[in-house]
Image: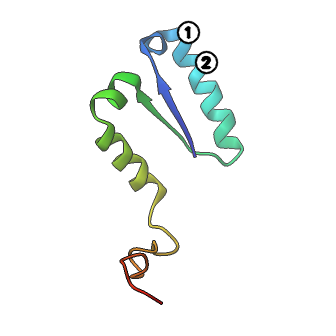
Amino acid sequence: MVIEIDGGQHDDDEHRKHDEKRTDYLASQGLKVMRFWNNEVMENTTGVLETIREALGPSPQPSPRERGEGEGRCT
């Protein structure tokens, strides 16, 4: 997974074409690219993180908390 945070300079044709070429290359290497605007990250961090989490899919193993570990139990 590649996450790019772009500023406004990426909103012109030249930068878009360059970004598309880089995305195509990274995809050919088996990587998924997600792009977010920098102001979106600053203003909606929770939403951006949720979008990334959803793109990653379910965790292959439950977290220690989901397994009941780390909740003050003595073992």
Residue in view at x 67 percent, y 49 percent:
30
Residue at the extreme bottom of the image, as rendered = 75
Residue in view at x 69 percent, y 42 percent:
28
Q: Is residue 14 positioned above or below 71 on the image?
A: above
Residue 69 versus residue 30: which sits nearer the camera?
Answer: 69
| Label 1 CA crowd tier, 10 Å (few <14, some 14–19, many 20+) | few
| Amino acid bearing label 2 | His
Q: Is residue 60 positioned above or below 9 on the image?
A: below
Q: Position of residue 39 (x, y in %)?
A: 34, 22
Total marks shown come to: 2
Disc 1 vs disc 2: Cβ atoms closer than 8 Å? yes
Q: Is residue 40 positioned above or below 75 on the image?
A: above
Q: Which residue is mark 1?
A: 14
Residue at the extreme front of the image, as rendered = 74
| Amino acid bearing label 1 | Glu
Q: Which corner quadrant of the image does residue 15 belong to?
A: top right
